[in-house]
Image (spheres, rainbow, N blue to C red):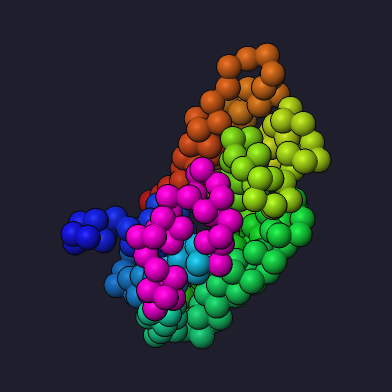
Amino acid sequence: MTVKQWGLTLAELTKVRITLFVAITTAAGYLLYRGGVDAGMVMPTAGLFILACGSAALNQYQERDTDAGMPRTRHRPIPSGDVSPRAALLIIVGLVTVGSLLLLWGGGMTAFLLGLLALFWYNGVYLFLKRRTAFAVVPGSLIGAISPMAGWVSAGGPIRDPAILAVATFFFIWQIPHFWLLLLKYGKEYEAVGYPSLTQKFSMSQIARLTFTWTVATATIGALIPLWAGMTSSLTRFLLLLAGAVLVIRARKLLFLQTRPFSVQSAFMDINIYALMVLVILCADRILI
């Protein structure tokens, strides 16, 4: 295996496309408290990113057998044989150790404990529930709330501040339609390997309506963040409201799943881009206004 191939394999093992968003939300939490970018942001952001990479790799190690049974995941590094389980474990230990030390050193004890909580919740609590209930994603979505809080406390912010609690709540709610959109495309694969799935309890139209409801909830929380965060700019409030309205309008296709053309991939991109836009708007408000 060439260096390039190994790099691509490692990126797939650590789910870099997902864990990069952890780094972004961590940096955003830091910036929202400090009001700008400084060198202190680097260590906790890198630490939580590396820890998240270790957590993602551990998840693939834990689910290597079921991954082998699903077309979407059977080509991942462990089930495909590109990385042995033993080698994966060594990589996981290294990533978790380095990430934890960087987070403790650069972010402090509270950020370090939040990082460990994310690891425990994702690889322990969520995985346990995932094998037992189709609604595991609801408590599992707590993971999405942790990274901005870790960035916030790394910058010196109080963990109980309404501003960061509002941002954390937004990402908690966002995780649910984010995942349920995937179920519209891959729900049957989860069933095939024995995971409980909403597709066993509801029709696709019902799942689509549930997803739309949670999408509306996500947009609503996003628009209300300034009330808790003390943001008084009319422009910020308007932009958040506009972004949420566009998301909901585009997501309305979920209500007509059986009668109109619908792209799950497009809807999935919409809700991810919306979350990124909310971060950009909030950070711009903090820096510029």
In the rendered structure, does residue 105 fall within the stretch colored magenta?
no
Image: magenta residue range: 62-91
Name the residue at the right extreme.
201
Residue at left offset 46%, top offset 58%: 79
Residue at left offset 50%, top offset 44%: 72
Q: Measured from the top left, where is residue 17 in percent x and y? A: 40, 52
Left or right of residue 213, residue 101 in this image: left
- Residue 155, by quadrant, is bottom left
- Res 139 seen here: no
Q: Measured from the top left, where is residue 99 in percent x and y? A: 40, 77
Q: Decide: is 184 above or below 41.
A: above
96 vs 77, nearest the viewer: 77
- Res 17 seen here: yes
Name the residue at the top extreme.
259
Q: Decide: is 270 above or below 63.
A: above
171 vs 67, nearest the viewer: 67
The total number of labels drawn is 0
73 vs 144, nearest the viewer: 73
Which quadrant: the N terminus? bottom left
Q: Decide: is 152 above or below 175.
A: below
In the rendered structure, does residue 63 fall within the stretch colored magenta?
yes
Residue at left offset 44%, top offset 70%: 85
Residue at left offset 42%, top offset 75%: 86
Q: Measured from the top left, where is residue 93 in percent x and y? A: 43, 80
5 vs 54, nearest the viewer: 5
Left or right of residue 70, residue 4 in this image: left
